Image (cartoon, rainbow, N blue to C red):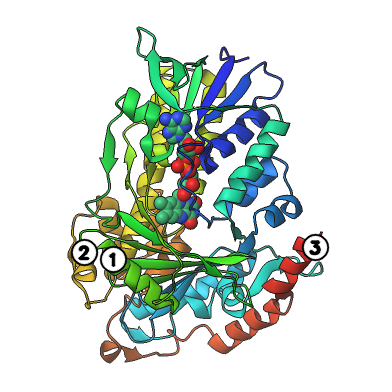
Amino acid sequence: MLNTKKVLILGGGTAGWMAANLMIKKWAGQNISVSLLESEEIGIIGVGEGSTPSLKDFFAYVDIPEQEWMPACNATYKNGITFKNWSSKPGFSSYCHPFPSQLDDYTADAFIYNAFVRRKGIDVEAHPDQFLFASHLCQQGLAPQAAFHFPFNVSYGYHFDSVLLGKFLKNKAKERGVTHIEGTVAAVEQHPNGDISRLVTKDGRAIEADLFVDCSGFQAVLIQQCLKEPFISFGNNLFNDSAVVMPTAATAQVNSQTIATALKAGWAWDIPLTNRTGNGYVFSSAFCSNDQAETELRTKLGLLDSAEPVRFLKMKVGRLQQHWAKNCLAVGLSQGFIEPLEATALHLVQETLLAFIEAYSAAGFTDKNRDKFNQIINHRFESVRDYIVCHYKVNSRTDTDYWRANSNNNDISESLRQVLQCWVGGADLRQEIDRQQIGRYFPSISWHCLLAGYGLFPEQSQLKPGNAEALKYNLTSIRDFVERCALNYQPHQNILQKLHQV
Ligand SMILES: Cc1cc2nc3c(=O)[nH]c(=O)nc-3n(C[C@H](O)[C@H](O)[C@H](O)COP(=O)(O)OP(=O)(O)OC[C@H]3O[C@@H](n4cnc5c(N)ncnc54)[C@H](O)[C@@H]3O)c2cc1C
């Protein structure tokens, strides 16, 4: 039984309500009260509409079926992300980073082998889209649910309206016993040992707790403003610090993937919901003004003359030195953010919460427990960061200062440097990912997709024709296999219609 009796979560964005739902579920029957304080006047960030497959586990964990939450949040299925225009290499202007599937067991070896052989300078097909199953689902607009008779699983994530998801999770948490308090924190009081003792609201209420969870977004009211926890910026290799956002009407056929299109000073997302499409341009203010970004996004959307307003956001990219300090855990944007390119923020929220609940339930507030937890979360942040940084580092665009600065930037981690050396040096990347123990965050197949998807191979003119050994895998039969497997999957639109009618 834990000593903690009162948990107070500050902040009612997605992070706060995910924390409330997980904690009330995990600590049920342990005489622990969970309360959440949020400020209507400050509101939430209201972006963050794509997930990784881990969100499926979150909903399973808190016992909420898709039939219930997806229609309430205008949600759609996501098989992966297609990256457009990140590479100028002929034949590689676009590639998909698909979520994994059991069917990849039959084709991924061929992809990895061919990518290896092509790195050695032999002309074989090594574009990831030709091999991996969920890429095909993305291209064909299919949903990830197989027909009942087809016994293979495909991992998938979601797209959703983040404001509606927050409201949905809020209602669930309240139904399950979380106390909701409305108010704006004006002061934070501490015990003599530095632990937080209570939060005082603008209207003079004082709320005490034993454990405080800081989900106050980029404000980081508790962990940074009060406890002064240092923030480590990732700005030296992730240049984007701004975004401009503008929704458009839903498309007739709803995509089953996110599209991330490289623009002049960043990239734009296209996230399909059932009632609208979410669009945003993530850019670097050092290379592009707000006005230029707005014009570029409007031009991309064909809405240059539209009166539809846009919204600008600033992003603080980096992580805290410690996510758990004193009696305070930071979760969500308050703990750090690695820009939205692979939609990993809520994944990190979930991982932070589950790791904390496990560590804290086992050993409570001890320095050793805290240090070990912080080390694990920092490793997660840095491993995810490196995968994202790699997208910028290996780009082959030369059209703007922004892209040239990214590819010329040698301020990358030693881990990423070794991954790139391994790839370019023609060594076994699977072994390198295993050696560095970073495959838990982005597995070797994801790294292969990125590097092969950008066409990071010897130039076409340098490639030699494939011999019998190099042409070990028959591409026609792989394509045939993928296409025939896909006959067991329905159009995304049909599956959504059924789901939203339930
Ligand atoms: C441009 C952009 C795109 C993104 N895209 C994705 C994506 O595709 N996928 C993904 O997973 N994530 C994405 N994210 C991240 C995602 O938006 C966040 O991780 C998620 O919304 C959680 O935010 P949060 O709950 O930490 O903070 P917020 O939503 O900002 O919530 C903060 C809460 O704290 C409260 N608060 C703050 N100060 C006080 C105070 N003094 N008193 C009382 N309450 C207070 C606020 O009222 C609010 O309730 C994106 C972020 C950005 C900036």
Badge 2 crowding class, 10 Å Cα cut-off, few under 14, some 14 to 19, many 20 or more, is: some
The residue pinned by badge 3 equals 501
Determine if residue 217 is in view.
yes
Kindly indicate the quadrant of the structure image that contains residue 282: bottom left
Most extreme residue toward the front is 307
Q: Nearer the viewer, residue 450 or 138?
A: 138
Determine if residue 441 is in view.
no
Cα distance between the residues tagged 1 and 3 = 42 Å
- State the residue at coordinates (27%, 69%): 292
Badge 1 crowding class, 10 Å Cα cut-off, few under 14, some 14 to 19, many 20 or more, is: few
Q: Nearer the viewer, residue 495 or 52?
A: 495
Q: Seen in the image, is 133 located left or right of residue 464?
A: right
Image: 187 above or below 254: above
Residue 73 x, y percent position in the rendering: 65, 54
Badge 3 crowding class, 10 Å Cα cut-off, few under 14, some 14 to 19, many 20 or more, is: few
Image: 118 above or below 58: below
- State the residue at coordinates (71%, 57%): 71
Query: Closer to us: mark 1 or mark 3?
Result: 1
Kind of residue indicated by mark 3: Gln
Most extreme residue toward the top is 192
Residue 158 x, y percent position in the rendering: 60, 58
User: Which label sits on residue 291?
Assistant: 1
Kind of residue indicated by mark 2: Phe
User: Which label sits on residue 247?
Assistant: none
Cα distance between the residues tagged 3 and 2 = 46 Å
- State the residue at coordinates (69%, 55%): 70
Mark 3 secondary-structure assignment: helix
